[in-house]
Image: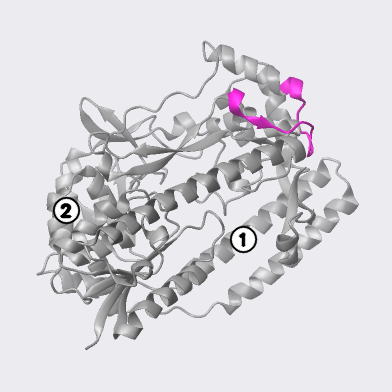
Amino acid sequence: MTIRFGFYGRVSTEDNQDPEASRAWQLHRARALIESRGGEVVAEFFDVDKSRSIPWQLRPHAAALIEELKDPRRDFDAVVIGEPQRAFYGNQYSLTFPLFEHFGVPLWVPEVGGPIDPANEAHDMIMGVFGGLSKGERNRIKIRVRAAMAAITATEGRFLGGRPPYGYSLQDAGPHPNPGKAADGRRLRRLVADPVTSRVVRWIYSEFLKGRGYLDIAEDLTLQGILSPSASDPERNKHRDQRAWSKYAVRVILTNPRYTGHQVWNKQRKDEILLDVENVALGTTTKQRWNTKDQWIWSEHPVHDAIVSVDEYQRVQEILSKRAHGQFSQRPHPTRRPYAFRGVLFCGYCERRMQGNWNNHQAYYRCRFPAQYAIVNELDHPKVVYLRESEILDEVDGWLGTEFGPDRLEHTIAAMAEQVIDPNEAALMDLRKRLSKCDRKLIQYRSALDAGGDPIEISSWINETKSERAHLEGELKAVPAAQRISVAEIRSMIKEVGDVVRLVGEADPDDKADLYTQLGLKLTYYPEKQYVEARINPEPPHVRAVCVRGGT
């Protein structure tokens, strides 16, 4: 008799692991255990880019596996794990295995040679040891990596990765010092001052030292037609407005010490925070936080092009400190509030995400675009756009309950199938954005020529960009024609979300926010028309729009 198995595995990409290779060897190890016993893997649950410290309930595929355990009609009879150290961390095994025992689903692991016996103390001890080893291994890796990066920053000033700050570009700096990585073609990179944007950075520092404020400088830059950091690198800043400079972009430039030519590391750290201080068993989640300036690691000597002097940078920090009415430090974050429409509600004026704002014990959403971006005669936008969550919550839930209820579900799926088009749309959009970036580069290079830059060097940049643009145009023509997504694929997407009617009716605000995100819900608020437009945009896009009319 064949035993049907569900396979669970996990991989983190923090240390550059290959998800496909990791999945393959974990699955191979699991099959080696079960196939000799007549077992067959019929379902896979594999979490990618999820730290082992994240509880099972917060890992998408682990959570889906737990939900399948509750269903007596599940497709598998048992679950097999190829590598317990990747699946369980700390005390996660003791918090998770009782669910397998309760629903009568055996859990197989290679380390015990078959299914875990809940009555066997040795099995329980072995699995507990693996959880402890997993936690210890992660902590050792963290300590070694942080110590190595601190030493590399201080003594070598090596570029440690990430996006280059506005004003810089990346230049090849030779082969990687690690022989193994060098053999794989890995190379070092270093920051070099961009001939166009570095002048903007110098101008920002100069004007600020003359007494001008963030928004004043941002408005001047926008009036001059200078591209903001988001517009200069749109591929990395798809989530940001690219029409104008924001005062926050100016502030980031003024507080970045790397413009002095020194490499600086450890400005931020990742802390593990309890999900619920009243229930430690729920585990922790990782939060990024700012370190104080005395914890920053500076390179001993300048290691890349300096755009401003150390003296100028320090003078700017002194001014900022005085304006903050005391020594500057990162302001503590306010108490976290639940917002059901977190990340899915947009302003109809500027198309930016509206920010949550807790007021009078209620959840509101607001857009303060004119106070943050230096828009000059481009957009008719009120100073503040406000919307109370309770005005639309019942309407949205009611609409979802109707459209995804048993009576309307097939009709909704059919309508989505008619509108969901072109899996190659993402590739087309990417190519168009890269073409636009080439056009922006050409404009910048010509401006540099007009400003008196080296004509020979700038001409070579122009020729390279033109060649790249021609290549992209060829790729654009080669993108296959549009294809439609099948009804079965859409039905599978909806099935992953579960019983939408039940979930919407019973969920708390945080769960609602996760559900709306999984559905691909997008709400756009048009204050002047007094309505909210709702769209369901599951991956891949797109579907038709439906208006939700409520008290607004």
Q: Residue at x 56, y 42 (%)?
A: 143
Q: Could you tell me residue 246's position as x and y percent?
A: 54, 34
Q: Could you tell me residue 46's position as x and y percent?
A: 38, 66
Specify the label residue 434 is tagged with: 1
Q: What amino acid type should be assigned to the residue bearing mark 2?
A: Val
Q: Could you tell me residue 67's position as x and y percent?
A: 21, 62
Q: Residue at x 43, y 52 (%)?
A: 133
Magenta span covers which residues? 293-312
- Is there a contact, CB below 8 Å, between mark 2 and mark 1? no
Q: Mark 2 points at which residue?
A: 504
Is 131 on the left-hand or right-hand side of 455?
Answer: left
Q: In which quarter of the image is the C terminus?
A: top left
Along the line of sight, the residue nearer the viewer: 465 or 496: 496
Q: Which residue is drawn at 63% across and 62% down?
A: 435
Principal secondary structure, stretch drawn in magenta: loop
List the single residue furthest toward the left: 407
Q: Is residue 498 visible?
A: no
